[in-house]
Amino acid sequence: MSQLKQAILSVTAAGDKAFVPYIMAGDGGLDKLQPTILKLQELGVTAIEVGIPFTDPVADGPTIERAGERALANGTTLRKVLETLTGFADQITIPLVAMTYLNPILAYGVEKFAHDAKQAGIRGVIIPDMPLEESGIVHPALKNAEIALIQLVSLTSTPERIERLTKASEGFIYAVTVNGITGARSSFAGSLDDHFKRIQTYTDTPVLAGFGISAPEHVKNFGSFCSGVIVGSKIVDSLANGDWDIIEELVKASKASAVK
């Protein structure tokens, strides 16, 4: 069992729900990466998704896209992010998940990336522009480095596709809650609990909800029928504004006392 999956199962076994904040590495400078990660860790998050800025993101909404542009303007690269993380890896006690694209990994070198990512504390990788059929490009190297390759499942995926994706996904299954790009939303279309239950029938790997989750009530609602949530745009905005109170409220909403 991957360290990432084990961390999520430990949280849910205790009655809480997994909470995974997304941060954009290099937004505000790479010197902010260490204090941000350590503060989130202190607040009790389950894992942290570390976004790597990319010039042509496929699913980012305006908030994360702007954060990526700021990070790129600061000279942030995949290599620099891993080097920065490695510098304080001994202080990190929770799994980190890298959200990056295929081209930067290929340019880095797949084997070298897997090795360096492991040293940096990366225990999971999300590659949104890499279809399942092409996962063999990176999966062997990641597996050797004990890094989980996480798959995204969309609302429009067919049952057959959902089954393939869920059985292939490691660490957790990233269940997308909306059709479209990331970004804070006030509501979600229709009832999603049946969709999440169907995903879970194919595997015992935890299912986490992501895209659009931006309020404590969203965290609680999704926590009622899945293993936890990923919160991106709201975290990125709050970090840019220095508003840790909002972040703390979101994390608290994942705890057993709030979910029940």
Image (spheres, helix red, strand yellow):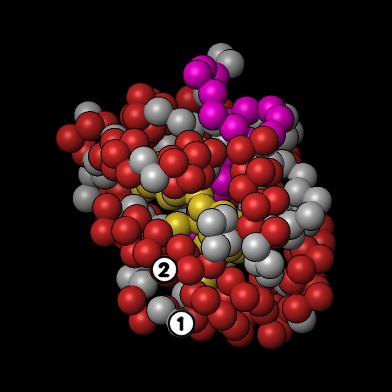
In the image, residue 189 above or below residue 140: above
User: Which stretch did the figure color magenta?
Assistant: 169-188
SS state under label 2: helix
Image-quadrant location for residue 259: top left
SS state under label 1: loop
Amino acid type, residue under disc 2 in the picture: Gln
Residue occupying the far top of the picture: 190
In the image, residue 21 lies at what x, y percent?
45, 49
Going 57% across and 46% down the picture, which residue do you hit? 174
- On whether residue 54 falls in the magenta region, the answer is no
The answer to whether mark 1 and mark 2 are in CB contact below 8 A is yes
All told, the count of numbered labels is: 2
Going 50% across and 19% down the picture, which residue do you hit? 186
In the image, residue 209 lies at what x, y percent?
50, 38
Going 57% across and 55% down the picture, which residue do you hit? 27
Amino acid type, residue under disc 1 in the picture: Gly
- Mark 2 Cα shell of 10 Å, populated few (<14), some (14-19), many (≥20): some
Looking at the image, which is closer to me, 36 or 58? 36
What's the mark number on residue 34?
2
Looking at the image, which is closer to me, 54 or 137? 54
- Mark 1 Cα shell of 10 Å, populated few (<14), some (14-19), many (≥20): few
Q: Which comes sooner in the sequence, label 1 or label 2?
A: 2
Q: Is residue 201 visible?
A: no
What's the mark number on residue 87?
1
In the image, residue 42 above or below residue 193: below
User: Cα distance, mark 1 to mark 2?
Assistant: 9 Å
Looking at the image, which is closer to me, 132 or 113? 113
In the image, residue 230 lies at what x, y percent?
48, 44
- On whether residue 176 falls in the magenta region, the answer is yes
Quadrant showing the C terminus: top left
